[in-house]
Image (tube, helix red, strand yellow):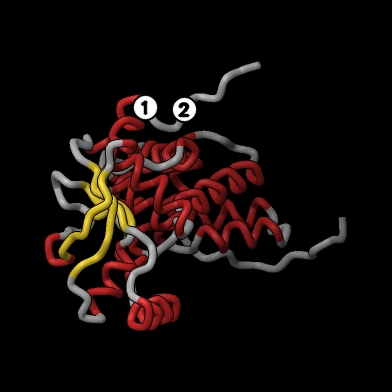
């Protein structure tokens, strides 16, 4: 039977086993740049958390890096505590973590506590953090497509996607579906439709048009001309 590759290295496992449960002052803790800012935004879920913290305190332990004082997990709980005037929390301190080890822990702890959206994973990717292999491939594929137009365009596209709080995977699906409809998988075709989704339409628009059986000629005319899709067509039952 094939053995599954361990999630954590032996060195990281040792550091996890040697972590210490401590009482830490909130003012000493720093925000991990990998943490998407919207995860601590004042929305309904956060207000509910803040109310619970005001009544019961922070019940779950947080996790932080002892060398840098960067929070690894518990950003929302710490912020809720801070807003309630709480000065200390209980947390696990991890010592001597490398940047990669901290990034691995960040991904593991945060994806199991509150699922990351595609946009939030993109924030992590753009900040140099670790994301799952499939997601990383989608990001690099978009960079290659964008850079085929002009060097640096791919990264600008990713930043635009992040600013719009969208997921790179959605754009890659749009690229793939368009290429399938027009029966052309060249880099030039991919770059044209990606540019269209960024600057004219949207990834969801392409997916919707494909789903509505929009003729390839109308899609191609719109993408090539950098204009919205114009025209009518008959949708036949399958």
Q: Label 2: few (<14), some or many (≥20) within 10 Å?
A: few
- Judging by the rendered image, the residue that carries numbered circle 2 is 6
Q: Is residue 34 visible?
A: no
Q: Dot 1 lies on which element?
A: loop
- Judging by the rendered image, the residue that carries numbered circle 1 is 9
Give the x, y percent position of residue 6: 47, 27
Instruction: Tell me the quarter of the picture where residue 97 sits.
Output: top left
- The total of numbered circles placed on residues is 2
- Give the position of the C terminus as an image quadrant: bottom right
Residue 167, label in figure = none
Spatial CA span between label 1 and label 2: 7 Å
Q: Dot 2 lies on which element?
A: loop
Query: Which residue is pictured at 25% across the width and 46% down the height?
Result: 20
Give the x, y percent position of residue 70: 20, 52
Which residue ends up furthest to the top in the rendered image? Answer: 1
- Along the horizontal axis of the image, is 218 left or right of 189? right
Q: Is residue 37 visible?
A: yes
Give the x, y percent position of residue 159: 31, 54
* Cβ–Cβ under 8 Å for marks 1 and 2: yes
- Give the position of the N terminus as an image quadrant: top right
Q: Nearer the viewer, residue 226 or 138?
A: 138
Q: Label 1: few (<14), some or many (≥20) within 10 Å?
A: few
Give the x, y percent position of residue 152: 26, 43
Relative to 75, is 143 above or below?
above
Query: Which residue is pictured at 37% across the width and 83% down the height?
Result: 55
Query: Which residue is pictured at 33% across the width and 50% down the height?
Result: 124
Query: Which residue is pictured at 31% across the width and 30% down the height?
Result: 14
Relative to 166, is 149 above or below?
above
- Along the horizontal axis of the image, is 176 left or right of 191? right
Q: Nearer the viewer, residue 61 or 234?
A: 61
């Amino acid at each position: 039977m094939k053995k599954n590759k361990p999630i954590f290295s032996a060195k990281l496992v040792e550091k996890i086993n040697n972590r210490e449960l401590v009482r830490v002052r909130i003012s000493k803790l720093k925000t991990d740049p990998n943490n998407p800012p919207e995860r601590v935004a004042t929305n309904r879920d956060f207000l509910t958390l803040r109310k619970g913290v005001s009544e019961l305190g922070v019940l779950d332990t947080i996790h932080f890096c002892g060398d840098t004082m960067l929070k690894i997990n518990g950003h929302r709980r710490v912020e809720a505590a801070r807003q309630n005037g709480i000065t200390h929390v209980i947390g696990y301190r991890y010592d001597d973590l490398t940047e990669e080890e901290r990034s691995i822990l960040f991904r593991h702890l945060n994806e199991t506590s509150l699922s990351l959206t595609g946009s939030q994973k993109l924030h992590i990717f753009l900040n140099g953090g670790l994301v799952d292999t499939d997601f990383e491939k989608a990001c690099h594929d978009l960079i290659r497509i964008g850079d085929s137009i002009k060097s640096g365009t791919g990264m600008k596209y990713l930043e635009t996607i992040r600013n719009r709080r969208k997921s790179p995977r959605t754009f890659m699906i749009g690229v793939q579906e368009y290429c399938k409809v027009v029966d052309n998988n060249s880099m030039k075709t991919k770059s044209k439709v990606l540019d269209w989704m960024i600057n004219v339409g949207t990834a969801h628009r392409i997916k919707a048009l494909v789903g509505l059986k929009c003729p390839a000629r109308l899609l191609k005319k719109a993408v090539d001309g950098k204009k919205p899709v114009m025209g009518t067509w008959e949708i036949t039952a399958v």
